[in-house]
Amino acid sequence: MRALDFTMMCGNGGGASEAGTYRCPPLLLNWGPSVETTNPDMISRLLNVVQMLTGKNTSDPDFMSALIDENYVVLNTTEAQNAIYTTGWQHATWNVDHNFIALEETESEDVLLLVVNDSSSPFEEEMENYIYFPNRYAITYSIEHIAGFECPASRSDPELNLYYYGMPAYSASLYLLEYTGI
């Protein structure tokens, strides 16, 4: 609803400002893989984002319904966390810009992951900005990028993790971590 409110207040591209050359929120401009350099159609862009989040007219999961579905539980910080990797995994409790919600379906054990970079800078630190799943192993999950920022190749550790190095400012990322049980 916040994105819709912003969209309705947005007009055509305006003069330069802190957020760039548009009178619209950077999060909506940067949802996809590139920023439009001409007058963005904000209504269509918002509808496209809603379509990605709801899985409408696609085979993708419905992230919005999962938030209120009793068959999904939110993973707590012992099950999913912001992390850095030095000599081992460390919980990055100080990272307030790398926000996420991980929802696990109780029957299938599939995980829906929604991640945002809430800062005005891209993630550029080499060993930071991981989402790490303690006690879960990459071999038992099929990782599928749904929309938004696509992670570069992650560490080859057996533990399940996604690496958000290079994630642009004010952008988002959707992933399905499908449990294979292998």
Image (cartoon, grey):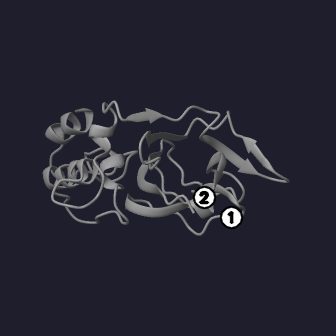
Front-most of residues 80 and 40: 80
Q: Is residue 5 left or right of residue 122?
A: left
Please rate how many residues cluster around mark 1, counting C-alpha atoms within 10 Å: few if below 14, some from 14 to 19, many from 20. Answer: some
Q: Is residue 39 above or below residue 104?
A: below
Whether residue 150 is visible: no
- What's the residue at 24%, 61% (across, down)? 59
Residue visible at 43% across and 55% down in the picture? 175
Which part of the image, by quadrant, shows the C terminus? bottom right
Q: Are marks 2 and 1 in contact (CB under 8 Å)?
A: yes
What percent of the width, then of the height, locates residue 8?
14, 39
Identified by mark 1, the residue type is Arg
Q: Position of residue 57 (x, y in %)?
A: 15, 59
Q: Is residue 24 above or below residue 13?
A: above
Mark 1 element type: loop
**Residue at disc 2, secondary structure:** strand
Q: Report the label total.
A: 2
Residue 77 appears left or right of 61: right
- Label 2 or label 1, whichever lies nearer to me, is 1
State the residue at coordinates (28%, 40%): 64
Query: Where does label 2 land, which residue?
Result: 163
Task: Work out how far the residue at label 2 is from the one at label 1, CA to CA, in angstroms.
Answer: 8 Å
Residue 69 is left or right of residue 82, and the answer is left
Residue that label 1 marks: 155
Task: Give percent across and percent down for residue 50.
Answer: 22, 48
Spot occupied by residue 45 in the image (x, y as percentages of width and height) = 20, 55
Amino acid found under the numbered disc labelled 2? Tyr
Q: Earlier in the sequence, mark 2 or mark 1?
A: 1
Where is 180 relative to 105, above or below? Answer: below
Residue occupying the far right of the picture? 87
Please name whichever residue, 130 or 167, is drawn nearer the observer in this view of the structure: 130
